[in-house]
Amino acid sequence: MANLLELYVKLVGLVLVGFILGRKLPNSVPTRLAQGLFWVGVPISIVAFLRRSDLSGQIWIAPAIAYLAILLGAFLAWWGMKGQAYFTKTIHQKSTQGSLLLAAMVGNTGYLGYPITLALVGQEYFAWALFYDMLGSLFGAYGFGIVLASHFGGNVRNYGQIIKSIFINPALWSFGFGLLFRDVTLSPIWESSLEKLGWLVIALTLMLIGMRLSQLNSWHRLPEAGISLTIKMLVVPLFIGSTLPLFGVTGEAAQVIVLQMSMPPAFATLVIAETFNLDRDLAVTSLAVGSMGLLITLPLWLWLF
């Protein structure tokens, strides 16, 4: 409980600082910070925290579970969408259907998943969160997510550019480098500096989330967003989390997987929605409400798992 309260103070505090700064600073500041974190900050943090992560056990099952969660989320969203369509006419629109599916599939397993895992479970199990995100969520969003978006949206068919954006992702390359760099011995000063730099990046990513939330002005589509968030943040982690022992995943490793599955929709869903002309209002509402709802669902998962 003490760890959770400490996390809430840091999480809410840093996001709130970012939210205030996002209202005061020029719009170019969040963009530049995001670019700096994308190209430099996040790769450094991945290398830093991988050094103390335990890679033993069935860690390679993490991305497989991520794909299972993504597919289950998509199926349940499709099923729920068909039933709710009788009551909410906007779901008949293909653009709304696409955004609803995306929000139910892919979570913010990087910018939010990393700091929450590190704070609640520790660095030893960080690799489970990393494998889930890098080899699961990343390809789920820009692979399966793109295919769905192109079906429900339109006007974008540059798949070569999409594939290129995946493989030039510096986080993916730093993931591979970090696995090799684990065996390199560093002096205590350099080791400590690298770890502090990693935590600084985590703080900046939380502030960036606050800046991004300060720019979200749309709160429409609450009924439709409720479908996606219920599936993404409650049904999927509860169902798959209860089956993890069947895969041999228990203890802290299972807790990390459940936490990653229960993250709110990723900012990538908004990027994809805007790129493929999906329902931006639904994507924005899902992001905002899901990020706030995380404060309510976290204690539930810590209690159950």
Image: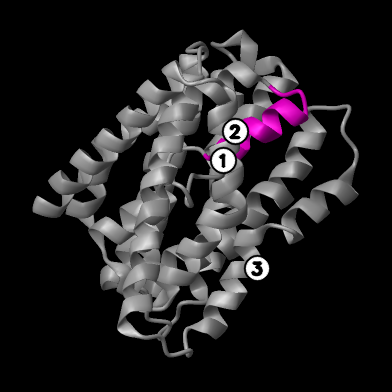
Give the residue drawn at x 45%, y 28%. 211
Q: How are the residues colored? A: one colour
Q: Which x, y percent locates residue 203?
A: 36, 47
Image height of 8 relative to 80, above or below:
below
Element assignment for label 2: helix
Q: CA distance from mark 1 to mark 2?
A: 5 Å
> Which residues make up the magenta segment?
266-278
> How busy is the neighbourhood of tag 3: few (under 14 within 10 Å), some, or many (20 plus)?
few
Residue 19 is covered by the magenta coloring: no
Q: Is residue 128 left or right of residue 88?
A: left
The three-letter code of the residue at mark 3 reads Trp
Q: Is residue 301 left or right of residue 234?
A: left
> How busy is the neighbourhood of tag 1: few (under 14 within 10 Å), some, or many (20 plus)?
some
Residue 276 is covered by the magenta coloring: yes
Q: Is residue 30 left or right of residue 288?
A: right
Name the front one of labels 2 and 3. 2
Can residue 116 be seen here? The reply is yes
Which picture quadrant has residue 32? Answer: top right
Residue linked to disc 3: 173
Q: Which x, y percent locates residue 152?
A: 77, 29
The three-letter code of the residue at mark 1 reads Ala
Which picture quadrant has residue 98? Answer: top right
Give the residue drawn at x 78%, y 44%. 147
Instruction: Answer whether labels 1 and 2 touch (C-beta < 8 Å).
Output: yes
Of marks 3 and 1, which one's residue comes earlier in the chain?
Answer: 1
Q: CA distance from mark 3 to mark 1?
A: 18 Å
Which of the two residues, 40 or 240, is positioned nearer the viewer here?
A: 40
Of marks 2 and 3, which one's residue comes earlier in the chain?
Answer: 2
The quadrant of the picture occupied by the C terminus is bottom left
Q: CA distance from mark 2 to mark 3?
A: 22 Å
Residue linked to disc 2: 31
Residue linked to disc 1: 34
